[in-house]
Amino acid sequence: MMQANFQRRLIWVGVFFGVATSGLATRLIWIQGVQHEFYARVAWTNQHLHILRQPRRGNILDAKGNVLARSEPMLRVYANPCLIGPYANQVAHLLAPLINWDEVALAQRLTPTVQTNSKGQLVTNSYVDLRRKLPHEQWPAVTQAMARVQFYDPTRRPTREEAAFLRDLRRYAVYGGEAHRRVYPSGQLAAHVIGFAQEDQALFNGRSLLRLVGRDGIERWFDDWLVGTPGWRETKKGLGWELVALREQDVPARPGSDVVLTVDLCVQQIVESALVQAVQRHHPTSAMALVVRPRTGDILAMATWPTYDPNHITGPPDWRRNRIISDVFEPGSTFKVVTVAAALNERVVTLEDLIDCEGGRWSYFGHTLTDHEGHRVLSVREILTKSSNVGAAKIGVMLGEPRLEQYIRRFGFGEPTGIPLPGEVQGIVHPVLRWDKVMITRVPIGYGVAVTPLQMVMAVAAVANGGELMRPRLVQRIQEPDGGRLIEYPPQPVRQVVSRRVAQDMVAALKTVVARGGTGFRAELASYTVAGKTGTAKKAGPGGYLPGRWFASFVGFFPADDPEVCIGVFLDEPHYGYYGGQTAAPIFKLIAEPLARYLCIKPDRLDNSGSPMVSAHGPGARPLPPPHD
């Protein structure tokens, strides 16, 4: 009986071990065969560490090499609450003043927690982001603070395990990673040109990387060149930390390329200082100014007010809009440059032809056109000098609708200029088929079309450049961080708009605008001959033109016969005067005088001894006419 029971027990033991062995074998086959790749990946992940390295974003430089935007290396501060455990309050007390955190909030952030993820697995908060941008010079203070963490129970000595935990906490619980901060040393200067960059998550080889991304201006347009190429590090780890001796790959990040602009920081300073004075004098809703070299199309300065500081972006989004390329307006009398140049080029008129200006009131198809001052017979030259609407409209009628539209488009209106900045609009030029009967008298004087300030300046610069329209050039080149040149952007002619002879005639006529008796006399310079045109246009609204709201402008260049610079000034809804000659022309002078000294432009107005004239208006000069247009 006992032997039988023993045999049955032996059989059951054998069956148990047989089933257990079979189960283990089946499980082994399942793991080694069916799930081999899964567990191989888990093992590889546990042993290997892949670290992406953020590249340094390239610089943006002005024409003289001054840094307008740069990236400074910073540290991103992380913590592992699992290595902090019961020391959260003590660590928070030591770190909070160093990383600008509230102590109570930081203690909660550093306290270990256990949560259930989307797969139903229990996970701990082994990674928290404490600060994105900590200067390198502040990191020693962080490590010294962590070294002062004391054992949480002063009444007894820590065990071996507790001492090891405390040692790991001091060394590894708080650590730093690579980061960069975008810095704009000149603050608000050229903010609408440079734009700004902000941190954002990006994918690189399927992995997430925090990098600086251009959001506006040059930062956005040339983001692919500025951003650089991330590096990476392939290494092995033990207990979650890198084993440096077993590092397999260490590819450094490649910094971004530098972008060199045509903007001159000193010229930009001159222009923005003048705009501030314009705002203080006339209180416009916005103000813009632009400086261009007519021969090359180089933009030396581009300024818009209101403005902002890309280091600390505040204010409404409207302040960040580059109005010089994104806002359109009816230009008013500055557009008469296009009308008269087209008529001269088509030989419809000459500068000496006489036109009856009807005493300042002229009816055309039931609509009356008026002048600020009543004039009878004026030459074409005087029509520009006095800015006669009636005279310019009659020239437009003589030229005809198709040819007028053709020259408007040849001067670059109705299409983007191609400047490398986001947000440029093409303006509004209606095709002739959509013109009503009176448009032929309104378009020649700058109504019924909408242009950007950049388009208007480039059109006048074309006249200054012998009739050749240039594409605005804002970027000279893209270069390596060490100065090696990658891409050059040479000056680009667009087309010959009018003949050189016509351009010379236009320059001669536009000189009279800035002389005594012209609408732009307030732009006259003592030592330089200026050619230019004033503009004053009513602003349109939903129900027609808005009473008391004007857009004032002046675009001019000097020295007139061999121009070095062309300057445009635009004031939207100025108060305390609204005519272009009264508001914008003096701001042109504020810009031009220091600009001429800075650029060492040779004077072309000399006295009898051959010296530059000191004053444009000597003793005994006749009183200047009242300001208009």
Image (tube, helix red, strand yellow):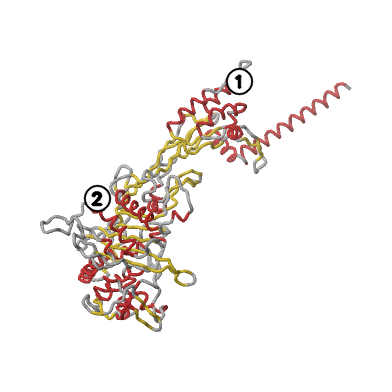
Q: Position of residue 579 (x, y in %)?
A: 35, 65
Residue 61 location (% of width, % of height): 33, 47
At a point 31% along the width and 51% down the height, the residue shown is: 270
Determine crowd level at label 1: few under 14, some 14-19, many 20+ residues with C-alpha closer than 10 A.
few
Q: Please tell me in which quadrant of the rendered image residue 74 appears.
A: top left
Determine the residue located farthest toward the left in the rendered image: 609
Q: Quadrant of the C terminus?
A: bottom left
Nearest to the eye among marks 2 and 1: give it: 2
Instruction: Give the mark nearest the N terminus, 2 or 1.
Output: 1
Count of residue discs:
2
Taking 599 as reference, is 169 left or right? right
Res 598 label: 2
Task: Please name the residue that numbered disc 1 is placed on.
Answer: 161
Tell me the kind of residue under disc 2: Tyr
Q: Is residue 263 left or right of residue 539?
A: left
Secondary element at image label 1 = helix
Q: Position of residue 99 (x, y in %)?
A: 51, 33
